[in-house]
Image (cartoon, rainbow, N blue to C red):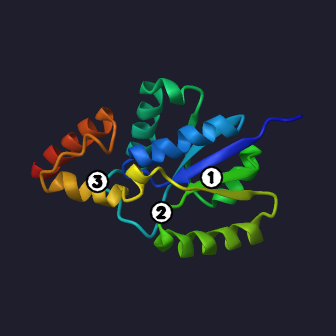
Amino acid sequence: MSEVIALVPGTFDPITNGHIDIIKRAKKIFDKIIVAVATNAGKMPLFSFEERVELTKKVVETDRELWGVEVEGVKGLLVDFAKRENAKVVVRGLRAVSDFEYELQMAFMNRRLNEEVEMIYMMPYIKYSFLSSSIVKDVFFNGGDISKFVPEVVIEAMRKKLSERRG
């Protein structure tokens, strides 16, 4: 039987403990996990594409529970990347009903583009149900403590970004 490869895609601007939770749980189910850091034309990211890929790699390298997880930058359609990587599953987190409509539209479109890729959705633990990269950035740039929401390497990267903004 061949190994089942799953993608965990996202913009990861920045990666949060909620994202990490989904990745760790997917790792328990599937043989191989590839975190697919995506460009997203609809968003104005804080970190560049290259910075998001590198930051996500650092998070994976510094967390023993994530060892063996691969991180790749993805430009273009996720289903095309899935085909190149022989991935049959895409794992996404669903925090609230507000996520459902967007995810449903994406699932239908992805199925039309590549029927061989299945979409799997995981509900977060309650402590992550409100957590998003946007909220983390907002709290951070308004002086709040984000240490319960992101790994230390992310905090360091955000401090660096803040100092760059201040010039």
**Height in image: 92 above or below 100?**
above
Q: Is residue 18 left or right of residue 30?
A: left
Q: Is residue 159 left or right of residue 31?
A: left
Q: Which residue is mark 1?
A: 91
Tell me the CA gap for discs 2 and 3. 18 Å
Q: Amino acid at mark 2?
A: Asn
Tell me if label 2 and label 3 are in contact, CB under 8 Å. no
Q: Nearer the viewer, mark 1 or mark 2?
A: 1
Which label number is shown at residue 40? 2
Read off the residue under disc 3. Answer: 136
Q: Residue, x 75% and y 68% (percent of image)?
A: 111
Q: Nearer the viewer, mark 2 or mark 3?
A: 3
In the displayed structure image, the side of residue 17 where residue 119 appears, left or right: right
> Sequence order check: which comes first, mark 1 or mark 3?
1
| Residue type indicated by callout 1 | Val
**Earlier along the polypeptide chain: callout 1 or callout 2?**
2
